[in-house]
Amino acid sequence: MNELNDPFEGLSKIEEVDADRAFSNSIGWYAQVLVDLKGYSSSEAIKEAQDKYHSDPPRFIEFVEEEVSKGYEGAKEFQQSLSVYSASWDLKNSPLISSVYNILMWSHYGDGLKGYCLKFDTALLLDSIKQLNLNCNVGLSPVKYTSSLSEISKYQSPKSLLESFVHKALNKSEHWEYEREVRFLSNKHGLHKFDSLALKEVYIGSKMPKQHRELLLSVLARVYSHVKVFEVGFDASAYNLVVKDLPMTLGFKLT
C-alpha cells in the first residue's frame, strides 16, 4: 500500500484515551484477549483480568500497555504490506456516469486516451483469483469515501485490531469519490493468475500509438479472442467521450 498515489492512504487517527480509563481499558483488553485466544467466557475472562490487575496494578497496566503498543504497530505494518489491485466499479442502476465515459479516469489512469480500459466480470474474476492462487488470501470490497479521517482504538484484541486496520485500508477522502474504486486486497505480492474468460471487454484510447495498439490487439487475438473491443475518442461537439466498435482484426498482423 506504500506505493499508492494517495498520500493519505491507510492513515487514521488514534483514539485519545483518558488516563482515568487506564483500569477499564486494561481490564477490557486483557479479557478480550482471553476470550479470543484461550476460549474463556466473557465472565471468566473479566474475573481473570480483574484478579491479574489487583495482584499488582502498576505491573499489570505496564504489561498491557506494552502489548497494546506491539499489537498496534504489528497491525499497522500488516496493513501497509497488503497488495492492492484497484478497479472502478460500475454499479447497476447507478446515476453516476460509467467509468468508460469518465474524462477524469482517462486523464489520470488512461494516459490521456493513449491507454486502455479492461472490463471484467467481477464475480468470475474474484472466484478465479481465489481458485488459481491457493497460496494467498484475496478479498474484494468497494472503497468508502468520507470527509474525515477514521479513528482506531488501540485497546482492541489483536484480532479485532487487525480487522480494523484492514477495514481502514478501504477508506479514502471524498475527493476521490469520482473513481468509484473497488479494491482487491491480497497478502501476496506480484502477479496473480485469473481465468481469461473473466475479461469481457477492452476499450482502447483513440490516441494510443499505432505500434502499441497493434501489440495489444495481437495479444487479445491470441489469448482473449472472446472479448469485445471498442475505441474511445472525443465527441467533437461537447466535452464528452464517444465509444465505437473496433473489430479485432483491424490494423494488425499476426506473426
Image (spheres, rainbow, N blue to C red):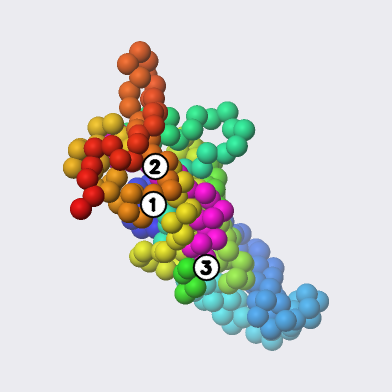
Neighbours of disc 2 within 10 Å: few (<14), some (14-19), many (20+): many
User: Is residue 17 left or right of 211 when viewed as pictured?
Assistant: right
Contact (Cβ within 8 Å) of mark 1 with mark 3? no
Q: Say which of 208 and 63 sits in front.
A: 208
Q: Secondary structure at mark 1?
A: loop
| Position in image of residue 250 (x %, y %) | 28, 37
Inter-mark Cα distance, 1 to 2: 10 Å
As drawn, which residue projects farthest toward the right? 43
User: Is residue 24 left or right of 158 when viewed as pictured?
Assistant: right
The residue that mark 3 highlights is: 131
Q: Secondary structure at mark 3?
A: helix
The residue that mark 2 highlights is: 202
The residue that mark 1 highlights is: 224
Q: Looking at numbered disc 2 in the image, what kind of residue is underneath it?
A: Val
Q: At x 42% / y 68%, what residue is drawn?
A: 188
Q: Looking at numbered disc 1 in the image, what kind of residue is underneath it?
A: Tyr
Q: Looking at numbered disc 3 in the image, what kind of residue is underneath it?
A: Gln
| Position in image of residue 58 (x %, y %) | 60, 79
| Position in image of residue 134 (x %, y %) | 49, 73
